[in-house]
């Protein structure tokens, strides 16, 4: 396949981006998106994308040329092609969707040889001038065809704080400011709940199994890979976030969503970076009631994950009045329930130790709530 890199056998890399840009508006027929056999433009787009991918990653026979790659990446930026490509991912055949995933991954990682830049040039362009690309990648979850390629690209670049900030701070009313860079991306500004991050709740809860699983993986990366930023974000939007989290995810009718969400909640609360979030969460009596209901779920793994959240309430030395009231009112029921809870986990020493510790904590509760010490 080395002929693909010859000057006379393929379009020069500098012209490829322009050719793809010109064919994108032609992908829709008069009745909307069409199959490849009904629209020759789809076939041509597929060939161009395959050629673009080969220039970026090379073949088994021929390594990619740094000069050609640099020319292609530069032309992709110049033609503003990333935004246009991500908007048509779902219209393309399977192999082309895979090619776009590869193209995005290579382009957003590429640094010119001997460059002193700290960020890849295309990624820096997206962050500074085209954050809409990130928003459109998230919208890939709106269609099964685009969910996995878009999700894979998102997770590749989510190691960068700025990408997480774009997702977390997106607001529909701020769309006109996106092109001006990251000035509006402030995690200390309360959210309306209408931005792209909040759509993940429905994608996870209502999507097909594949869409839900992929969206949850990305959602989890957003919440766990940028601890200082996310901790502040969760405190700023505490009521909005946990209202959605508890009602949409923890109480989801999907077993997988429910279990994964309870487990993630436990991880968030037990992370030291989220100490303020944990303190606020476990002071809420309604949160405790929700957690206690999880202990009675008919599915043992839901019970087990719920236990790891419940223990945070009980182990907290500064329990709120509301939490104390619930635990004291249910003291004897809990003392009867807990020693027999998940009795078949006889070889899980850590669980057994934690269960015994919670029993002792509940046994030593005061007869009436005691105001917790002040800050």
Image (cartoon, helix red, strand yellow):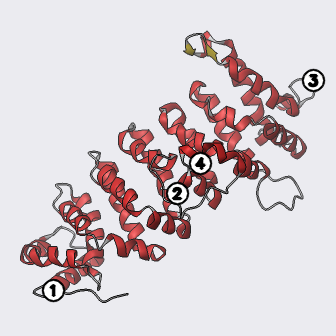
The quadrant of the image that shows the N terminus is top right
Q: Gap in Å between the C-alphas at discs 3 and 1?
A: 82 Å
Q: Pick whichever of labels 2 and 4 is earlier in the sequence.
A: 4
Residue hosting label 1? 365
Q: Secondary structure at mark 1?
A: loop
Counting residues from the N terminus, which is met first, the one under dot 2 or under dot 3?
A: 3
Name the outermost residue toward the right: 7
- Give the number of the mark in front: 3 or 4: 4
Q: In the rendered view, does 347 fall on the left or right side of 244?
A: left
Dot 4: element: helix
The quadrant in which the C terminus is found is: bottom left
Say which residue label 3 marks.
8
Q: Position of residue 360 (x, y in %)?
A: 17, 86
Residue drawn at x 26%, y 59% as measured from the top left: 301
- Packing grade of label 4 (10 A; few <14, some 14-19, many >=20) is many
Q: Which residue is mark 2?
A: 222
Q: Where is residue 94, by image quadrant?
A: top right
């Amino acid at each position: 396949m080395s002929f693909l890199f010859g000057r006379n056998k393929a379009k020069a890399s500098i012209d490829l981006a322009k050719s793809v840009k010109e064919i994108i508006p032609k992908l829709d027929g008069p009745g909307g998106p069409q199959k490849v056999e009904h629209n020759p433009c789809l076939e041509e787009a597929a060939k161009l994308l395959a050629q673009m991918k080969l220039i970026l990653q090379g073949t088994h026979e021929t390594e990619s040329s740094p000069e050609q790659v640099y020319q292609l990446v530069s032309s992709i930026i110049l033609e503003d092609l990333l935004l246009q490509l991500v908007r048509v991912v779902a219209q393309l055949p399977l192999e082309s969707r895979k090619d776009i995933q590869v193209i995005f991954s290579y382009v957003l990682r590429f640094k010119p040889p001997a460059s002193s830049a700290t960020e890849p040039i295309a990624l820096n362009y997206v962050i500074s001038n085209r954050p809409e690309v990130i928003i459109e990648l998230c919208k890939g979850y709106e269609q099964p065809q685009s969910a996995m390629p878009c999700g894979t690209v998102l997770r590749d670049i989510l190691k960068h704080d700025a990408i997480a900030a774009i997702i977390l701070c997106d607001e529909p009313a701020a769309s006109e400011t996106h092109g001006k860079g990251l000035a509006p991306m402030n995690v200390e500004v309360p959210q309306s709940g209408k931005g792209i991050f909040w759509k993940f709740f429905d994608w996870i809860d209502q999507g097909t199994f594949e869409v839900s699983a992929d969206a949850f993986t990305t959602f989890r990366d957003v919440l766990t890979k940028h601890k200082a930023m996310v901790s502040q974000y969760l405190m700023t939007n505490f009521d909005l976030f946990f209202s959605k989290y508890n009602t949409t995810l923890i109480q989801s009718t999907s077993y997988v969503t429910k279990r994964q969400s309870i487990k993630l909640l436990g991880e968030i609360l037990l992370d030291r970076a989220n100490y303020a979030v944990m303190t606020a969460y476990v002071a809420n009596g309604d949160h405790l009631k929700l957690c206690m209901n999880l202990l009675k779920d008919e599915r043992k793994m839901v019970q087990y994950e719920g236990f790891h959240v419940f223990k945070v309430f009980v182990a907290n030395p500064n329990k709120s009045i509301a939490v104390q009231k619930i635990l004291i009112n249910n003291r004897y029921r809990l003392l009867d329930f807990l020693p027999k809870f998940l009795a078949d986990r006889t070889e899980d020493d850590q669980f057994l130790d934690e269960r015994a510790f919670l029993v002792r904590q509940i046994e030593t509760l005061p007869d009436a709530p005691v105001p917790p010490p002040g800050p």
